[in-house]
Each structure stands twice: as C-alpha cells, then as structure tokens.
Image (cartoon, grey):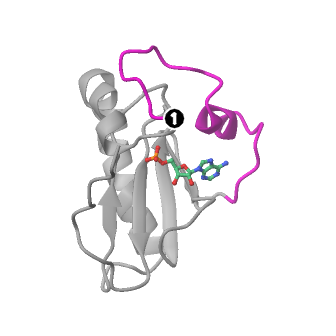
Amino acid sequence: MSVDLKRPYDPENIFAKILRREVPVQIIYEDEYTLAFPDIAPQAPVHVLIIPKGPYVSSADFGAVAKDAEIAGLARAITKVAEQLKLSGSGYRLISNTGPDAGQEVPHYHVHLLAGEKLSSKLVKKTSN
Ligand code: AMP
C-alpha cells in the first residue's frame, strides 16, 4: 500500500524497526545521521537503501523539517556508500519515491541507490491504476 503523506510518522514502520535493530539487516554504512543496507528485493545488481536516522515520512518531510546537519549528513553518506562500493567511476542511480503517485511503500524517507549494470530507461512507465 502506498504511503499517505498526510499521516504522521509511524514508529512501527519496517525501517524504524531496522533502526532499532528489531529487524536484522546487513549494515553497509552507518554514521550519526544515516544507515545504509541492501534492499530486500533488489532491482539491480547493487541496490542499497540509504535512510536518515530521524523520523521523517518522506523526502518532502525531510526537506521541510530535518536539520541542516541531517540533510548534509545524508548527502555525504550517499557519496560515501558509492565510494565504498567502488561505484564512483561506473556510476549509479538515486531514486526517492515520495507518496502515492511515486509508489512509496515504506513511510520512512529513503533513497534507493541502484548500480552494477547499465540501467534501463530513466523514466518509469505509468501503471494502469
Ligand atoms: P519504496 O517503494 O520506495 O517505498 O521502497 C521500499 C523498499 O523497501 C522496497 O524496495 C522494498 O524491497 C524495501 N524493503 C522492504 N522491507 C525491507 C527490509 N526488511 N529490508 C530491506 N529492504 C526492505
């Protein structure tokens, strides 16, 4: 089910549980502001989720409410993850689905990092519904 952007942050969402270590993941990167771990259903040879540790529902919420240090922290963490995974030369794609039209499913802001092959069209086709 898609995320309702009007709802408050749900502390029982799966990424909140991952942050509280209630659900185990392979940690790829962690710092004061950020956690990165593999997507459970990878859409590319490399598919990592990079999330802020703060309770933000979406990209919109994060951009409006997060402290500058958290925003900078996430941006720098993305670059560090890419460097750590040796993607700086070959490249990668960042996607952040926000709300129902984008098909956001987990109501905790996250950035998908996709890489490891020549990725298909940059635009995602409309679904029928
Ligand atoms: P989105 O559709 O942009 O909200 O993306 C949510 C992503 O979270 C999907 O790509 C899921 O495969 C991924 N996901 C859901 N549960 C887990 C989990 N326990 N560990 C890792 N990734 C997950």
Q: Is residue 114 magenta?
A: no
Q: Is residue 30 above or below residue 107?
A: below
Q: Is residue 95 above or below residue 42?
A: above
Judged left or right of residue 24, residue 83 is left
Q: Sort mark 1 into few (<14), some (14-19) or many (20+) by Cα contacts within 10 Å.
A: few
Judged left or right of residue 121, residue 74 is right
Kindly identify the residue that appears in the image at 34 percent across and 48 percent down: 96
Residue 35 spot, x, y in % from top left: 54, 48
SS assignment at label 1:
loop
Find residue 69 and report its image quarter.
Answer: top left
Kindly identify the residue that appears in the image at 55 percent across and 67 percent down: 42
Kindly identify the residue that appears in the image at 51 percent across and 40 percent down: 32
For the residue marked with disc 1, what is the amino acid? Met
Q: Does the magenta stretch mainly form a helix, a strand or a loop?
A: loop
The residue pinned by badge 1 equals 1
Kindly identify the residue that appears in the image at 50 percent across and 55 percent down: 49
The span picked out in magenta is 1-26
Is residue 46 or residue 127 the one in the foreground? 127
Q: How many marks?
A: 1
Is residue 40 or residue 102 the one in the foreground? 102
Residue 75 spot, x, y in % from top left: 31, 50
Find residue 98 and report its image quarter.
Answer: top left
Judged left or right of residue 50, residue 12 is right
Q: Is residue 8 magenta?
A: yes
Q: Is residue 89 above or below residue 41?
A: below
Residue 37 spot, x, y in % from top left: 59, 57
Find residue 22 and report its image quarter.
Answer: top right
Ligand 1 lies under 8 Å from the Cβ of mark 1 = no
